[in-house]
Structure formats: C-alpha cells, structure tokens
C-alpha cells in the first residue's frame, strides 16, 4: 500500500469476509451489496462517532443502523430522494465533494441544503515532486526525445472525467505527445481501441501505475 498509493502513515485495515479466497489489491466485484451491508454493520458494532464513506448504499445502511455519516461523492448523479431522507433523519452529517461546480449542482439542481454540502478539493503532496529525477532522465526512461512537447494526465478514463476533451486536443495538436496514466483495465482497453480507431498516434495510455511513479510522469 505504501508504494502503490503513496501512504506514509500506517493504519489498520480490517478485511470483511465477503470472499473466501484472498485477492489483491481488490477482486472484481468487491463493491457488492453484501460487502456494503457487512461493512456498515461492522462499523455500527464499533460504535463510532462518525462513518465516512464513498458509497451511498453504505451510508444508507449505516444510517438505518443509527450511525451518523459523511458521504463523499465526485459524481453529478445522486439519488436525491434517498439523500434528503437521510438528511431529514439527522443521520447524514454532510456531503463532501471536490469542486464548487458540483456543489452548485447539488444545491441548485437538486435542492440540497448548502450548509450540508462541503467542498474539499483533491490535494497534492508537493514534496514528492521535489524528489524525482530531472526531465532529461525522465524522457530517456519513457523513450521521448528532448524536442517533443508532452502533455500528461493522471486519473480515471471513464466518461465525464475529461478524457474525451483530451482526445480532441490530441487531434488538434498532433505535434504534442499525450501521455496518459490511470484507469481500470477495462477502461484502458476501451480507450486504447478508441485511440487506434481515431488514429491518434500521439496518444500513449500506460494504464494504472504506482503512486510513487506519478510525480515523475506529471513533471
């Protein structure tokens, strides 16, 4: 976990016995309804002051068990009626999202109380960028000559994450190499097929890489 996710402070991980065979880092279909129910039940048994989750379903189960929760979401689509019921019931303490734009959607379009929606932009550890090799060494490692301009992206590849705009930019700027890292295997496969179909010879998708490699790629 330290090298894969860049974690520096150890913490305890509890495995929920949904599958008999251990798989790392996560098995396909790990985020099942059974897992969410068992995880919420485990959290309730620990009698916490608060549960923090990225799953609406897990938050709903925890709320039914009487646990106050915070939901973090990066999606524009929310089950608004369920969220409002959780707020009215007093068990959903807040919703955390990553941009003022999403907060405007939640409050303006869906009518969620503004005081219940918090904005916490994604953070970055600048110290990790100070420890990477120089640009020339990195270009040699990735097989890129010193004269080629590079545009980099690290993140997921599913719809509404901006990858469509990146591909459009690649079409408009064939002289620039677009180096893209991240994404689930099935999304990487689909996007690579799209790159071939659209003949985007200046786009390279490397798939998911360890966190420790990201600063060198973005720099």
Image (cartoon, rainbow, N blue to C red):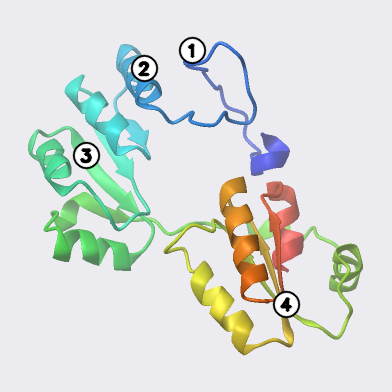
First of labels 1, 2 by sequence position: 1
> Tag 4, which secondary structure?
loop
Q: Residue at x 37, y 20 (%)?
A: 34
Name the residue tied to disc 1: 17
Vertical position of residue 39 compared to residue 143: above or below: above
C-alpha gap between disc 1 and disc 2: 9 Å
> Tag 3, which secondary structure?
strand
Label at residue 87: none
Name the residue tied to disc 3: 93
> Tag 2, which secondary structure?
helix
Disc 1 + disc 2, Cβ < 8 Å: yes
Q: Quadrant of residue 217?
A: bottom right
Q: Nearer the viewer, mark 4 or mark 3?
A: 4
Disc 4 + disc 1, Cβ < 8 Å: no
Position in image of residue 58 (x %, y %):
31, 30
Q: Residue at x 89, y 78 (%)?
A: 145
Name the residue tied to disc 2: 38
First of labels 3, 1 by sequence position: 1
Q: Residue furthest left?
A: 88
Vertical position of residue 25 compared to residue 145: above or below: above
Q: Quadrant of the N terminus?
A: top right
Name the residue tied to disc 4: 202
């Amino acid at each position: 976990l330290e090298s894969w996710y860049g974690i520096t402070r150890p913490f305890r991980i509890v495995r929920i016995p949904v599958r008999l065979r251990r798989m790392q880092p996560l098995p396909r279909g790990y985020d099942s309804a059974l897992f969410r129910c068992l995880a919420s039940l485990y959290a309730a048994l620990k009698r916490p002051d608060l549960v923090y989750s990225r799953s609406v379903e897990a938050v709903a189960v925890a709320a039914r068990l009487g646990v106050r929760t915070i939901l973090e979401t990066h999606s524009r689509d929310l089950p608004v009626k369920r969220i409002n019921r959780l707020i009215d019931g007093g068990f959903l303490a807040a919703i955390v999202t990553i941009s003022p734009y999403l907060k405007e959607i939640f409050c303006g379009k869906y009518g969620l109380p503004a005081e219940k929606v918090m904005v916490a932009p994604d953070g970055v550890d600048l110290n990790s960028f100070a420890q990477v090799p120089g640009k020339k060494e990195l270009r040699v490692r990735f097989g890129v000559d010193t004269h080629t301009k590079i545009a980099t992206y690290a993140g997921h590849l599913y719809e509404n994450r901006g990858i469509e705009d990146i591909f459009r930019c690649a079409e408009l700027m064939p002289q620039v190499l677009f180096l893209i890292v991240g994404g689930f295997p099935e999304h990487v496969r689909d996007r690579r097929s799209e790159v071939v179909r659209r003949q985007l010879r200046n786009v390279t998708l490397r798939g998911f890489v360890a966190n420790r490699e990201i600063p060198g790629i973005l720099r």
